[in-house]
Image (cartoon, helix red, strand yellow):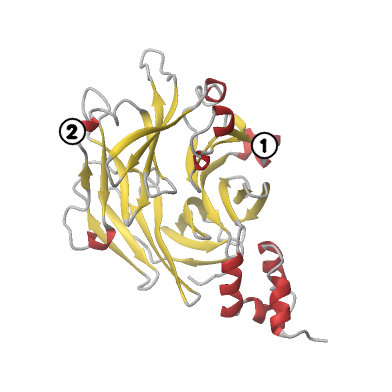
Amino acid sequence: MDLPTDILESVFLRLSMFEVARSRTICKSWNAVLCSRQFLIAHAESNNDDCVALFSQEGRKLVLYNDASPSWHSLSLDFLPVEFTDVITAAGGLVCIAGQYHGAYNICVANPVTRSYKIFPHIDKTPYLPAGAMVVSKNKVDGECSYKIAILLVDAVALFSSLTFAWVKFETALPCVPQNPTFCNGSLYGLHNTLSPWKWNWRLVYTKLDDACCSKEAWSELYRPQWGEILDILHQPCLLESSDGCLLLIGGLGYSSATDSCITLIILKLDLTTLEWSEAARMPHEFYVHFACNEDFNIFGHNGNVYFSSEATPRLLVCKLSVGQTTDAELWKWVEDCPSGRNYKTTLLKRGFPFKLVLNSSF
């Protein structure tokens, strides 16, 4: 006997994201209920599947960690054409992936839960992948999803809108590509090296993407004389967004070129309202020793916390800035049972990012 739609919806709302996705394949009537706008809106309101994700090149999969559970889960990307192998960003349940497709470098957006994807129009210039890409906005109107994606090119910024399904490019006036693009409070921020012949000379730059198409010089410098050389004292600085609308700057402290080493890693916080820096956290030595000999580690933020992953250790380290001022023992934690732990040197988990599981496959 067929159950009424409202009863079916209430039952499915109690299932996990993955169980709902599998249930769509059982029969046409279930699929109609689970793909309806009413169910998608109700599910989005009750959805707590907020994770961090690491991309594994081995088998093309996302390894997800949910801090609320806590639990690990894997999502395969095998539904994508084999050419798409470079995961470059993710936000709001969508993953942006690049690859050489039909002889040209293309980018697609995919939802690993619903195993659906869409390939973007070709860009005539190859993205500068070391700098990455950024999903700059993702909005829902009556259950419909729209988004914008910014891709850094060598001499330009390309902005894609799902509403127009087209790229808009605008040139930049910087001699090199800004690193660690981070979207915060309606602007895209990055770290720009002024290429001093004597030392690294970093500057914080930003661009308001809504105005970028009307501007010949996309990037503007954000600097105050009272900052001094605060950006230059950090080795290999990394820029992140915090949960309270501030910027986080993470880098090596006390770097010595003679020994090619640092004392530790430090997290600085910039209040974009007052433009004042403060120290948010400093990694204790017992944690830093796992990263000191390997500079190729990954740093990413999620829900006010900062995560560190490295090929040199099978564990994920989290700095719980969301808990506020506390002791080092409470602030710094290892995330255990990472799936890479059994054979982490071959699994190569890379490119961590926040990831919220969603059922809406609208592109």
The image quarter containing residue 203 is: top left
Residue occupying the far right of the picture: 1
Residue where numbered disc 1 is placed? 336
Above or below residue 91? Residue 281 is above
Above or below residue 261? Residue 307 is below
Mark 1 closeness class: few <14, some 14–19, many ≥20 residues within 10 Å: some
Say whether residue 112 is left or right of residue 103: right
Q: How many marks are shown on the rendered structure?
A: 2
Q: Nearer the viewer, residue 20 or 245?
A: 245
Q: Nearer the viewer, mark 1 or mark 2?
A: 2
Residue 41 coordinates in the image, percent (x, y):
56, 74
* Callout 1 amino acid: Glu
Q: Find numbered disc 2 in the image and state the secondary structure of the residue it sits on.
A: helix
Above or below residue 230? Residue 70 is below
Residue 169 tag number = none
Residue where numbered disc 2 is placed? 225
Q: Nearer the viewer, residue 276 or 223?
A: 276
Q: Is residue 5 visible?
A: yes
Residue occupying the far top of the picture: 258
Residue occupying the far front of the picture: 325
Q: Find numbered disc 1 in the image and state the secondary structure of the residue it sits on.
A: loop
Mark 2 closeness class: few <14, some 14–19, many ≥20 residues within 10 Å: few
Residue occupying the far left of the picture: 216
What residue do we see at 36% from left, 52% from top? Answer: 183
Say whether residue 299 is left or right of residue 149: right
The image quarter containing residue 228 is: top left
Estimate the spatial distance between the alpha carbons at disc 1 and disc 2, rounded to whole Å.
43 Å
Q: Is residue 25 visible?
A: no
Q: Earlier in the sequence, mark 1 or mark 2?
A: 2
Residue 62 coordinates in the image, percent (x, y):
60, 51
Say whether residue 92 is left or right of residue 232: right
Above or below residue 318? Residue 360 is below
